[in-house]
Amino acid sequence: MPAPTYWDYLQLDKLLASQGGLDGEPSPDELHFIIVHQTYELWFKLILSQLRLARDHLAAPKLPEERVPFVVHHLGRVNAILRLAVDQFAVMETLPPQDFLDFRDKLVPSSGFQSYQMREFEMLLGLTPERRIKYAGTDPIEHIRSQAHTEAGRKVAAQLMATMAETSLRDALVAWLSRTPIMGSRPGDADDDAVVDRFLADYYARVEQHQREGGDQLVTVLDGADEDKIRARVEAALQGVRSFLLPDDAATRRARAALVFIESYRHLPLLAWPRLLLDTCVELEEQTLLFRHRHARMAERTIGRRVGSGGSSGVDYLDQTTAYRVFPELWNVRTCLLPRDRLPPLLGEERYHFAQE
Ligand code: HEM
């Protein structure tokens, strides 16, 4: 067996022979277009593998503390790739609009809209079918399935269906949150429901007082100007806080309570990794939104507001996708937080310290 070589190990012969385009040797601009897209698809492949690893750790029925760093590690790698992917659109943008028009027509109707790895990424994050924006009345997943005429297409369609059946990162995160001890109380403890509800009711009462005082302060410093409007805004914000902190469903209440608890008492040693996990998920959502936004601006710069090669309304459609939120509660919780000196007194603190010899 000869010693391995760099080119064999990386299968460079196959990789570098895959830029042929549709009709023979592509022009230099088309080569650029193909390579940029292929690079993204390679990154997507790595993102999917890292997301699955993170999800598998998180979805374990009982997640030992020492496995949380693995989840953070895999998601941190996804975030690093996404940051790069956002910047990478600058390479695409070196293609002037007219140079793209020279070969664009022959691609129609293929489009990034058919990037099945992007759809798997969305599914694994937890974007549900009913929240997907339809384009021209077509569901993006149905669109891919409707184009699956070849062997490769049928494989893609089957792969999408299999991914759709997997547990998403979002579901795993919510399940993990609902198992988190709150004020020292664990699910299954005799009075857990009462502890959780007391914590939430107390927290809400304190937020109400704090935000109303904030309104009073604004009215005073603004010398009474717009008093009615300011008070109405505070009450509207409090209405949002109330429905977030006191939802009817008990399972949702427990997960929300855990979120508020981790964010509020984030200085406790045993909450250090959970809090990092939440921060990493917020960054994941933020980077995904930046990716969508950056892609939309790059597309607008290249094709303006014309119809997309996949047949959508183009940039208008892309802009609508920047409203997707997979972890809305990780954002909403920020509206509810209290300054440290206003927090409910901590119970069961000893449960959140490292074990002493
Ligand atoms: C000249 C460059 C590009 C232009 C003008 C462009 C334009 C568009 C447009 C208009 C759409 C909407 C669907 C349609 O009707 O076609 C779209 C979708 C998409 N494009 Fe691009 N794109 C470009 C490059 C890229 C690159 C480099 C990627 C890399 C991943 C990419 C990924 C995607 C994805 C994932 C979608 C689906 C978005 C969604 O449905 O949420 N595009 N693109």
Image: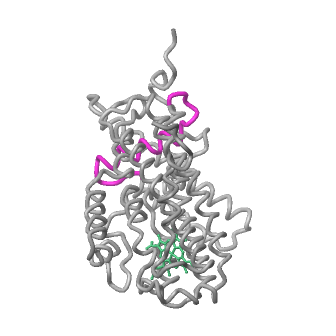
Tell me residue 162's x, y (percent): 26, 57
The answer to which of 217 and 315 lies nearer the viewer is: 315
Q: Magenta span covers which residues?
A: 245-270
Is residue 40 something one can see in this rendering? yes
Tell me residue 53's x, y (percent): 40, 43
Tell me residue 146's x, y (percent): 27, 78
The answer to which of 125 and 216 lies nearer the viewer is: 125
Position above or below: 357 against 27: above
Q: How many labels does the image show?
A: 0
Q: Quadrant of residue 248?
A: bottom left
Position above or below: 337 against 112: above
- Say whether residue 34 is left or right of residue 149: right
* Residue at position x 42%, y 43% in the image: 54
* Residue at position x 59%, y 72% in the image: 228
Position above or below: 273 against 244: above
Is residue 207 something one can see in this rendering? no
